[in-house]
Image (spheres, rainbow, N blue to C red):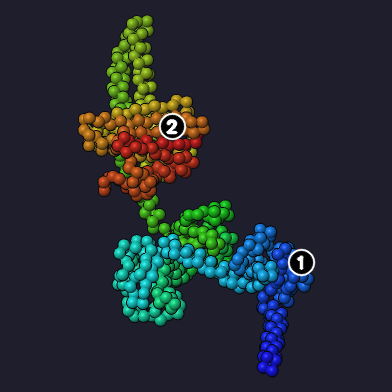
Amino acid sequence: MASRDRAKTKKTEIEKTLAQQTALVREMARFPEMNPGPVLRIDRDGIILLSNSEARLVFGNELVSKNWKEVCPGMNNESWNTILSSKKVFPFEAYVGERCFVFNHRLDTATNFVFVYGTDITVNKENEKKLQEQRAEMKEMARFPEMNPGPVLRIDREGLILLSNSQARLVFGDELVSKNWKEVCPGMNNETWTTILLSEKVFPFEAYVEERCFVFNHRMDSATDYVFVYGTDITVNKQNEKKLEEQRAEMKELARFPDMNPGPVIRTDFKGIIILSNVAAQNVFEKNITGDCWVNVCPRLTQELWDEILLSDKVFPFETVIGEKEFVFNHRTDSQSSLVFIYGTDVTIQKLAERQLRHSEKMASLGELTAGIAHEIQNPLNFVNNFSDVNKELVDELKNELATGNVHSDSYRKANEIADDIKANEEKINHHGKRADAIVKGMLQHSRASSGIKEPTDINALVDEYLRLAFHGLRAKDKSFNAIMKTDFDEGIGKVNIIPQDIGRVILNLINNAFYAVTEKKKQLGDYYEPTVSVSTKKEKDKVEIEVKDNGNGITEKVLDKIFQPFFTTKPTGQGTGLGLSLAYDIVKAHGGELKVETKEGEGATFIVVLSK
């Protein structure tokens, strides 16, 4: 009986265990479907025997009997053989569409099946990619401070500098680490530093370090409790801002300027239409000229000159006469605004003074000529007086010889010879009288205003005459003066159409300057120096050149650009008006010619007058 009960109990236990195993098998059959990722069972040849719904969702509905090596992207025989020989779980990554999976393969040696459990790691991959990018960025940032062209610093909450790049050390000095930023940065104080620590935004702070201006942008990093400082040199910006402020102030003042200006101020467009005119302009033209055309309003201004004004990139002065007054209107073209700004100045008194000074200069040069002219006149007058005395004696002899009354006698023949001598002497008296007359006429021509009429003139004779007049004039004033004079005249020049008294003034001025230059050098060097002035003429195609050369001290580069300016002189006070070369320049220009200078300091100067033939 007991034996039967034990058997019955054992059967009950077996049935219970079998029921549990059956339930477990059923649960395991449900397990792949419960897995959120793909699950597959594959034989050793790679044939898929089972797949859950997630696997079919990933790869497609028909998976059973397909080869895993063909279904799984990137899976090949070599990888499959590695899986079969592996004693551990073998992970294999594959992209299916845009999703990334890791498929863990495990070979079950009991059943010879390969169980595959897939996990979607797309998000992980993206996170890994971002992590790699962050690492690369961090690596780059580690290099960043030294690459930054401006100062970069990392500072703790107390203001102690923990890190600085080379540029920061260059600005503030080598030893920065452990120093307090509030002491290093000019103008930084506890109050500002507290504001920086509390700020949620970038906090800019301007500071001058010696002569350079910087803006230091402070950023508080709450994660690390560090303050990162990035400096930028804004010195040029500050200078530009200052200039801009000055320009604004100037523009503000200019807005008030026109009506405060005592002279005419006018603004026109590029067509010449007057947009603005101040009170002074309206007084000058005796009406409101706004809206009129400047070319029509301004006397002597032509359309051709207006076009030239528009093309000029410099201030363009234009002189004119309005009523009894003389004005110079300075035109400045502004291409940005397409406007022309015109500033007028009444130069009536100045022009009168210039004319008076020019007259004084002319009279001064006439005074310099006087002694030379006196010397030159003395020679023909001596000839006239001498030959007159000789003629008196010859007339007396002639009377005595004619008194014999015998036409065939020697006395009669001698009387004829005396008559011939008297005739020759009279011709010489006439020649030298005309010579004296020409000298006096030349002096008168030089003293009075130019006729403005050009006439054919022997340039060689004109130059030679003024050379001798200048030389003897200086000799008369200073008996110790002497100089070697060299001439080289081109006889093929012929006559040139000029205003002789004007060109004579030019030549006289250049020769006097040359004599002055060699005299000054003689005073410096004494007997070791031979003062020499060379005057030459030559024909160059359709041009004639007059050259006055000296071996004086030459002209320094410092004053070379100024020598043709009115009232500029290098002579001591009282010895020069500064108008000589200026007048010479204007006269030559008025003849359509050119006045040039070549010089070498310490060796002399050469002035060249170029005239059209």
1 or 2: mark nearer the eye:
1
Q: Is residue 2 left or right of residue 469?
A: right
For the residues labelled 1 and 2, the Cα–Cα distance comes to: 120 Å
The residue located at (51%, 53%) in the rendering is 312
Label 1 amino acid?
Lys
> Helix or strand or loop: what does disc 2 sit on?
helix
Return the residue nearer the eye: 76 or 179: 76
Q: Position of residue 323 (x, y in %)?
A: 48, 60
Return the residue nearer the eye: 86 or 582: 86
Seen in the picture, residue 70 relative to 5 is either above or below; the reply is above
> Helix or strand or loop: what does disc 1 sit on?
loop
Q: Is residue 282 left or right of residue 579?
A: right
Seen in the picture, residue 547 relative to 242 is either above or below; the reply is above
Residue pointed to by mark 1: 66
Numbered tag placed on residue 179 in the rendering: none
The residue located at (72%, 67%) in the rendering is 43
Seen in the picture, residue 588 relative to 234 is either above or below; the reply is above
The residue located at (34%, 14%) in the rendering is 418
Res 215 visible:
no
Residue pointed to by mark 2: 459
Q: Quadrant of residue 485?
A: top left
